Image (cartoon, grey):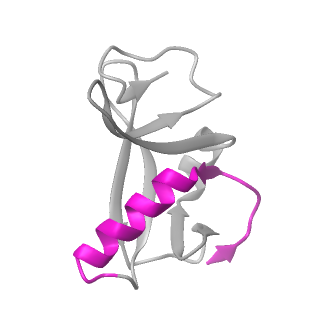
Amino acid sequence: MAVGWGIMITLTPAAAVKVKQLLETENASDLALRVAVRPGGCSGYSYEMYFDGDFTAEDKVEAFGDVKVVVDPASAQLLAGASLDYTDGLNESGFKITNPNANRTCGCGQSFS
């Protein structure tokens, strides 16, 4: 597992707090947030996020306070410079990825090309 291998995706403080809360709620503070890019979605690629404890030697790991983020090498290339934010408001709530590598996104905000 490659720790500290460049910045692939960053978490805003709000996102790190929410991920930590979710991990605590699940009693799974030993897991990491896996962020991945998969082929599919209406624009070509879609984001996938889930808690994971199964890492490979090639995975890239970053720590944001008590929260670890894991990204596979192929996804890391597509997520370089991206950030994950969390908002909780009347108009929008949830996680949102801002990705400078995305040339185009779809209306749902979950896929890009």
Residue 24 percent coordinates (x, y): 31, 77
Name which residue lies at 38% across and 18% down: 43
Residue 60 percent coordinates (x, y): 62, 65
* Direction from residue 8 to residue 112 in the image, left or right: left
Residue 48, magenta (yes or no):
no
Corner quadrant of residue 13 = bottom right
Toward the front, the furthest residue is: 90
Give the answer, above or below, for where 13 lies relative to 23.
above
Name which residue lies at 22% across and 76% down: 26
Name which residue lies at 32% across and 30% down: 40
Give the answer, above or below, for where 104 lies relative to 69.
above
Corner quadrant of residue 19 = bottom left
Residue 112 percent coordinates (x, y): 45, 24
Toward the left, the furthest residue is: 26
* Direction from residue 52 to residue 60 in the image, left or right: right
Residue 17, magenta (yes or no):
yes
Q: What is the magenta range?
A: 1-28
